[in-house]
Amino acid sequence: MAKPKPIKINQVSKDFAKQQVLNNIDLTIEPETIYGLLGRNGAGKSTLFNIITNRIPLSGGEVTIGGQTVTDNDDVLNRIYLMSEANLYPSRMRVKEIFKLTTQLYRGMDMRLAQTLAEQFELNTDTRFNKLSTGSRSIMKLIIALAVDVDYVFLDEPTLGLDANHRRLFYNALLDSYAKRPRSFVISTHLIEEVSNLIERVWVLQNHQIIVDDTTENVLNKGFAITGPAADVEAYTAGLNVIGHEALGNLRVQYVYGELDGDRPIPDTISTSHIDLQRLFIYLTNQEVVTVEN
Amino acid sequence: MKIKAAFSYQLKNYFKSFGWVYLWSIAVVVILPFAISLVLGRINIYDINDYLPQFLPALILGFYLFVFGGISYDGFKLFIQNGLGRKTYFFSKLYALTVILVVGEVINLLYGVFYRQFINTKKNPVMTFSVLYGHYFDSAAANTVSVLIITMLFIACIMVTGMVIGSCLGLFNRRVQRISIIGMPVLLFVLLVVLVMLNDQTSLKLTWLGDFLLFIVGMGNQSADTGHFVAFAPMISGAVYIIVMLLISYRLTLRFRVPR
């Protein structure tokens, strides 16, 4: 089977009335890669997903796959599935009927996997969609997302309403499904710690723009916590890209995003360590951040 | 476009709902009065002829196509969730409703023949428009075909009107939709009253509007007898109306979007 072509997001902008949500977004979604789209509430993550899947019109730019626009183009739209909070299925339809319909309208669906997952998640497929709880609706959509035959799966807050056990079950199912049939997943979530081990590439959306677009490994390698006496820490981090700090008495921690100055000797009084993705995200998206290296 | 799968899904759903609308209509129009007569002990004077209108299937078909032609946004939501665009949604819906129209019209014809043979044997025509256009051509076959075409175009006009209203409403949120659904009939009623009042003062028949309306239904030559009106006029005006309304509906459908 030929490798799918990447999704190109070129100069995409979106305004709602006079409010700008996205400003000149440029991204490439490569096949068979797991992405994490991180951003604060209202950053425009869902809007970006809705634009990629042609659910809403864009104000500027274009989204293409293999040079073909996604706008009302079944050939490319049929290769994308978006699982979101929006309930677009008929409320009176039963879960098993929704599975069947998905099989019919998409190129197919792994019904055996869907059935297995439904049993694991204890989802009754005879239940009507409007009788499902928030968590069960999420589960139903996740099952479709993992079983449907597409090249790109967008998951917008996939674990909404799921308890810890079900979230673990989902992450395992996702990895299992990815291993058996590699395809791209783009996950937007606030539970960063839970997905940090899954995602291969990180995007951070802030102030209507993508401020980080890099591999998870590189992003983590660029995040440092510099700890020590306040004066020494401030002296060492002068000129570096400090994205945040914490202080306790004379002890100070400065968080740095970017390369440390290799020529500058590290004083014995301070220590450096890498920081986790969640902490990095918190400081990167703090409104008081001075600069961000992309 | 993935029209085949979409059409197949739409058609199946439409047939199912069409059947339900028929069943409910029969229950309300035929069975309910019969049951009431039975309960009240008046079954001896119950006459099916009083309760079974000749145009019942035509009314059901027109009502069905207007309402289901108007339900637009829910279908769009489902299709976009399943990776199908607005164009596919529009055309699959149009094709499926057209099939329903043809099937419904065949039912109307069969019912008309049955009604005339067994229920009310008065010499009412099987197709209503025969009264106006049934003698335009010299050939009986040509008259039958032309009246059939006019009837189908008339029902199609009702369908596309529903589609335009539905696709227009689909651009707004639920609140505006509800206000429009309640407000529009009121507005239309007021407009009708104004027109009637105007007609009292200066007969519309004497204005260009009156002449135009008569012309598009084939009554331009007012000396023509009933049954001899120009059959081509409603065909052309109906076709033009359908094309214009479909274009409007199509353009509006392309503007559908998922709520923010």
Image (spheres, coloured by chain):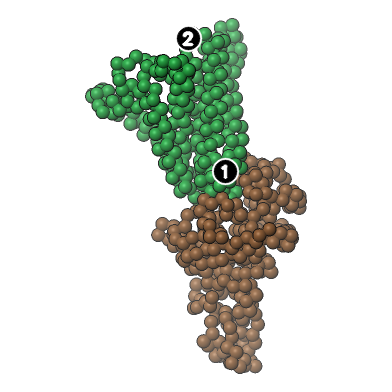
Residue A161 quadrant? bottom right
Q: Which quadrant of the view contains residue B135?
A: top left
Residue sitting at x 44%, y 25% = B150
Give the label on residue B123, or none.
2
Which residue, given by chain and number where applicable, does mark 1 sit on? B3
* Residue nearest the observer in this picture, A67 or A108: A67
Residue sitting at 57 percent across and 43 percent down?
Answer: B3
Sequence order check, earlier mark of 2 and 1: 1
Q: Badge 1, how many Cα within 10 Å: few under 14, some, many 20+? A: some
x then y, percent, for residue A211: 53, 72
On the question of residue A133 being in view, the answer is: no
x, y percent for residue A170: 71, 58
Tell me: B171 left or right of B104.
Answer: left
Q: Residues within 10 Å of mark 2 (few under 14, many from 20)?
A: few
Label 1 secondary element = helix
Position in image of residue A218 (x %, y %):
62, 76
**Figure colour of chain A:** brown
Between B246 and A129, the one lying in front of the other is: B246
Q: Chain of mark 2?
A: B
CB under 8 Å between discs 2 and 1: no
Quadrant in which residue B99 is drawn: top right
Say what amino acid the circle numbered 2 marks: Lys
Question: Can you tell which of label 2 and label 1 is closer to the viewer?
Answer: 1
Which secondary structure lies at badge 2?
A: loop
Q: Amino acid at mark 1?
A: Ile
Query: Label 2 to label 1, Cα distance in Å?
Result: 45 Å
Residue B153 percent across, percent down from the top left: 45, 28
> Is disc 2 in the same subunit as disc 1?
yes
Q: Colour of chain B?
A: green
